[in-house]
Amino acid sequence: MVFNYEKLNVEQDGMVVIAAINHPPANSMGQGVLRDIEDLLTKCENDDTVRAIIITGSGNKLFSAGADITEFASLQAGNVPKYNGNEIYFKIENYPKVVIAAIQGGAYGGGLELACCCHLRIMAEEATLGLPEVKLGLNPGWGGTQRLPRYIGKTKALELMLTGDFMPAKDALALGLLNKVVPQAEVLEAAKKLAKKLAGGAPVAQREIMKAVRLGLETNLRDGIMKIEAGASKALQFTEDFKEGAKAFLEKRPPNFKGR
């Protein structure tokens, strides 16, 4: 697949697509970045050569500093942006393939909100994160007030949002927001290693697991098990991948999953 974007640097390494936000000086989530991310997700969704996507930032300083302040005047004038951050973030969260955030630098505001809607997160130990919108007289508006408390708890999330202070990566790891913290120079390679491991897995099963977890967190335990989880099991039991997985297990060899 050929990738040609204005605000993303995109490459494909095997079945993994790596997209680096390229919107200096802050890798802010402006309309161009949102447009390119949405288009990339659409292109990759039904492409069997892509099984995982990594989103990272260009440069070492910032993953993304959030909303593009240069676009605020247009919003204050009442103009409705063409690309809605919340809709695109929901698309990432609901995406049927694994999306990993490789947070090589600071993640603030909409940048942290972007990381929160990815399925997995690896961050540089030197980096910090936060939702500083309150310092501009604003609130986090792309899911921060809803997703962050679900990850780190209401009390700590409120502290971050009400003070606008930044949190070190090690603290975010301890609170369960991150999967792994590594030195900055190792962030992308760590994300690639994880993505390639997942790309060799069973795509349909991965999709159903992510869907079941997402929907289950929005309901009660009984419905989560008896309806959502049971529905996933039913959807998977007649797939070619399940047949291949069982056969490979009996034959003591690695499975060759096709995503069918």
Image (cartoon, grey):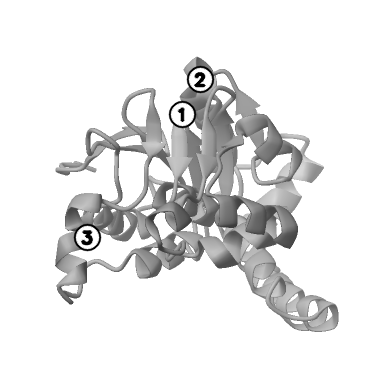
Q: Answer with the quarter of the image where residue 250 lies.
A: top right
Name the amino acid, label 1: Gln
31 in relation to 164, above or below: below
Dot 3 or dot 2, earlier in sequence? 3
Dot 1 or dot 3, earlier in sequence? 3
Other-residue count near label 2 (Cα within 10 Å), few / some / many at <14 / 14–19 / ≥20: some
**Residue at position x 75%, y 83% in the image:** 227
Q: Are marks 3 and 2 in contact (CB under 8 Å)?
A: no
Q: Answer with the quarter of the image where residue 228 lies.
A: bottom right
Name the amino acid, label 2: Gln
The residue tagged 1 is 104
Q: Nearer the viewer, residue 71 or 19?
A: 71
* In front: label 3 or label 2: 3
**Could you tell me which quadrant the N terminus lies in?**
top left
128 in relation to 148, above or below: above
**Residue at position x 55%, y 39% in the image:** 166
Q: Is residue 82 visible?
A: no
Q: Nearer the viewer, residue 14 or 74?
A: 74
Residue 100 spot, x, y in % from top left: 51, 43
Name the amino acid, label 3: Phe
The residue tagged 2 is 184
Q: Are marks 2 and 1 in contact (CB under 8 Å)?
A: yes
The residue tagged 3 is 72
178 in relation to 212, above or below: above
Tell whether 74 sits left or right of 137: left
* In front: label 1 or label 3: 3
Q: Marks 1/3: CA distance?
A: 26 Å
